[in-house]
Amino acid sequence: MNPHGPERKPLFVSHRLAGPPLPAVVLERANRFLARCRLDDGREVFAHVPDRGRLTNVLVPGARAYLFAAQGPTRRTSFSLLVCEEPRSSVLVAIDPAGANLRTRALLDRGLVPGIPPGVSVRPEARLGESRIDFLLTRGAERVALEVKSVGVTRAGIATFPDAPTERGVRHLEELARFVRGGEGEALVLFVVQRGDATAVRPDGEIDPLFARTMRRLAKTLRYAAVGFEVAPAGLTFRGELPVLL
């Protein structure tokens, strides 16, 4: 599959939850799933945190954040925290891995995923071994297994993944490699950087040495690519492709 040239008009993608962004201040991250916040109207509320990563230096007390109203029978809170301003840099970060998949779908529909042309058939949540991959792409006899990784942390301007040890991430890489070696098609790991200040992406060997080693070991079998988005309270703007440093 060959790459397609970028479109002229910048792609803007709204956040996955509808409604206006509600400004707030983070008071504490109560646990991996919840943050206690104070809305600008003075109310203290708990908000769901979609990102299970450590979010060091991002989701910290005193950080500005944007909450979105959310409803559901199994929810513990009526809000989700999707955007947080990193205090040290004042950069807005989308801490929303599920949103990365929606943004990837928007890129696929426009032929903006590196190495993937427009017009492919897209099947989300396809079974692959013991797991599910984010997308299975087909065009004629060609097949590409696409796994999306959301990235929200940087070090010295370089986005790093993962933000916490991920056995699941290592398993996904191994299953993608088996897919390729079995002659079933190609495999692409796409890092979606949801902050506007990154110049490249690399695996974080300090956080997860096994994931970093596995990425490097499989570099001749898998394809790696990265894209960046600028984050605003109302949504994200596509910045283009970023290099992946191994």
Image (tube, rainbow, N blue to C red):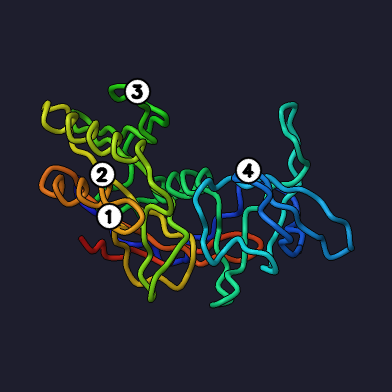
Instruction: Tell me whether the residue at label 1 lies in contact with that at label 2, contact meaning CB atoms closer than 8 angstroms.
Output: yes
73 displayed left or right of 209:
right
The residue carrying pointer 2 sits among few (fewer than 14), some (14 to 19) or many (20 or more) residues within 10 Å by Cα, namely many
44 up-or-down from 157: above or below: above
Name the kind of residue labelled 4 in the image.
Phe
Q: Secondary structure at mark 4?
A: loop
The residue carrying pointer 3 sits among few (fewer than 14), some (14 to 19) or many (20 or more) residues within 10 Å by Cα, namely few
Q: CA distance from mark 4 to mark 1?
A: 29 Å
Q: Earlier in the sequence, mark 4 or mark 1?
A: 4
Q: Earlier in the sequence, mark 3 or mark 1?
A: 3
The mark found on residue 225 in the picture is: 1
- In the picture, the quarter occupied by the C terminus is bottom left
Name the kind of residue labelled 1 in the image.
Ala
Q: Earlier in the sequence, mark 3 or mark 2?
A: 3
Query: What residue is rendered at 41% in x and 63% in y?
Result: 228
Q: Earlier in the sequence, mark 1 or mark 2?
A: 2
The mark found on residue 33 in the picture is: 4
Query: What residue is rendered at 19% in x and 33% in y?
Result: 142
The mark found on residue 188 in the picture is: 2
Query: What residue is rendered at 27% in x and 32% in y?
Result: 138
Q: Quadrant of residue 157?
A: bottom left
From the viewer's side, name the closer residue of 165 and 73: 165
143 displayed left or right of 9:
left
Tally of numbered discs: 4
Q: Which residue does the numbered mark 3 point to in the structure image?
A: 127
163 up-or-down from 64: above or below: above
Q: Secondary structure at mark 2?
A: strand
